[in-house]
Image: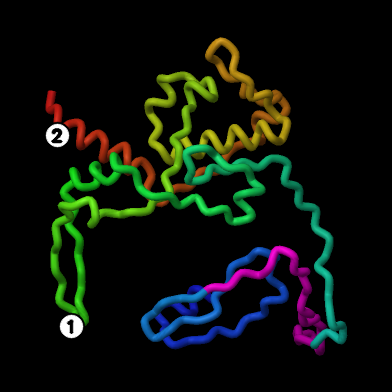
């Protein structure tokens, strides 16, 4: 709600309750006159306190909010179970969840090969000056391309997970990463063995759980990289 209400705002200092945030949460502390946002992080060692919630009482058949007299109200006990977790990080070697939660930096200098590949794409930068005029500047030198990156290691579903090659060939990078994360989460939960024997992965769920277990997958640009690769292949090799 805070992010939505401050969209496009400048010169703004938000007011929000930080005590109720979970330790380690990043929160907005200000927006300057150039729309630049500044964030702070609640210390991991901080405790969590809960603000009192209004109590709804019925008065003459109509609900009325009555302020609670308690200084601190603990939330109701709700049974939430997390049995398996998996995550992929933008690194050549995947980090553990501990490092991920601690905010280990995965940004590294872009390799020479990556820089040369960017130049080969004939990228044109759009730059706007103070007057609002837009200039188109072709990127031709290594110094003009992106210098830092956080590449994610592609998931090898055939070699590391033992999935059929014919199935994996139809997936794009985002889909393959989602499948890998889902399988790893099932393995960590102890629902599947996850071992690879003779090139085949043992990912079969128990029959009693097969019909009620699934993986939700969402992507901003599904199959976009596969589409680009296919168009590029057709352009370079029409046959």
Crowdedness near tag 1: few (<14), some (14–19) or many (≥20) residues, C-alpha within 10 Å: few
The residue depicted at 74 percent of the width and 65 percent of the height is 45
Give the percent coordinates (x, y) of residue 152: 45, 42
Q: Nearer the viewer, residue 157 or 122?
A: 122
Residue 21 percent across, percent down from the top left:
68, 70
Marked residue nearer the N-terminal end (1 or 2): 1
Residue at the image point whose x is 21% and y is 81% from the top: 130
Q: Secondary structure at mark 2?
A: helix
Q: Which portion, as a residue range, is magenta?
A: 39-66
- Residue 86, above or below 233: below
Judge left or right: residue 227 versus residue 90. left
In the rendered image, residue 229, in percent from the top left (x then y), is placed at 26, 36
Q: Count neighbours of disc 2 (C-alpha within 10 A) and say few if under 14, some if 14 to 19, many if 20 or more.
A: few
Residue 159 drawn at (x, y percent) = 49, 21
Element on which disc 1 rests: loop
Mark identifier at residue 131: 1
Classify residue 232 by image quadrant.
top left
113 or 47, which lies in front?
113
Question: As displayed, is residue 142 above or below residue 134?
Answer: above
Residue 214 colored magenta? no
Query: Which residue is rendered at x = 29% and y = 42% of the image?
Result: 112
Q: Which residue is mark 2?
A: 235
Q: CA distance from mark 1 to mark 2?
A: 39 Å
Residue at 24 percent across and 55 percent down: it is: 143
Which marked residue is nearer to the observer: mark 1 or mark 2?
Answer: 1
Outermost residue toward the right in this view: 70
Task: Tell me, yes or no, whether the highlighted magenta stretch contains residue 47.
Answer: yes
Q: Is residue 178 left or right of residue 82?
A: left
- Residue 113 in which image quadrant: top left
């Amino acid at each position: 709600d805070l992010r939505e209400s401050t969209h496009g705002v400048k010169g703004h200092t938000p007011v929000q309750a930080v005590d109720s945030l979970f330790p380690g949460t990043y929160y907005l502390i200000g927006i300057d006159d150039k729309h630049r946002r500044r964030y702070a992080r609640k210390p991991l060692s901080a405790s969590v306190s809960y603000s009192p919630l209004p109590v709804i009482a019925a008065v003459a058949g109509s609900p009325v909010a009555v302020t609670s007299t308690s200084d601190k109200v603990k939330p109701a006990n709700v049974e939430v179970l997390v049995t398996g977790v998996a995550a992929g990080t933008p690194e050549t070697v995947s980090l553990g969840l501990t490092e991920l939660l601690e905010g280990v930096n995965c940004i590294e200098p872009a390799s020479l090969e990556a820089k040369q590949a960017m130049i080969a794409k004939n990228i044109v930068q759009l730059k706007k000056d103070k007057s609002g005029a837009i200039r188109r500047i072709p990127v031709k030198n290594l110094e003009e391309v992106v210098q830092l990156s956080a590449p994610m290691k592609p998931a090898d579903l055939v070699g590391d997970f033992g999935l059929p090659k014919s199935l994996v060939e139809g997936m794009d990078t985002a889909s393959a990463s989602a499948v890998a994360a889902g399988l790893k989460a099932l393995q960590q939960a102890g629902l599947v063995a996850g071992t690879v024997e003779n090139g085949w992965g043992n990912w079969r769920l128990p029959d009693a759980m097969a019909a009620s277990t699934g993986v939700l997958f969402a992507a901003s640009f599904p199959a976009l990289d596969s589409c680009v690769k296919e168009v590029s292949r057709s352009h370079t090799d029409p046959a």
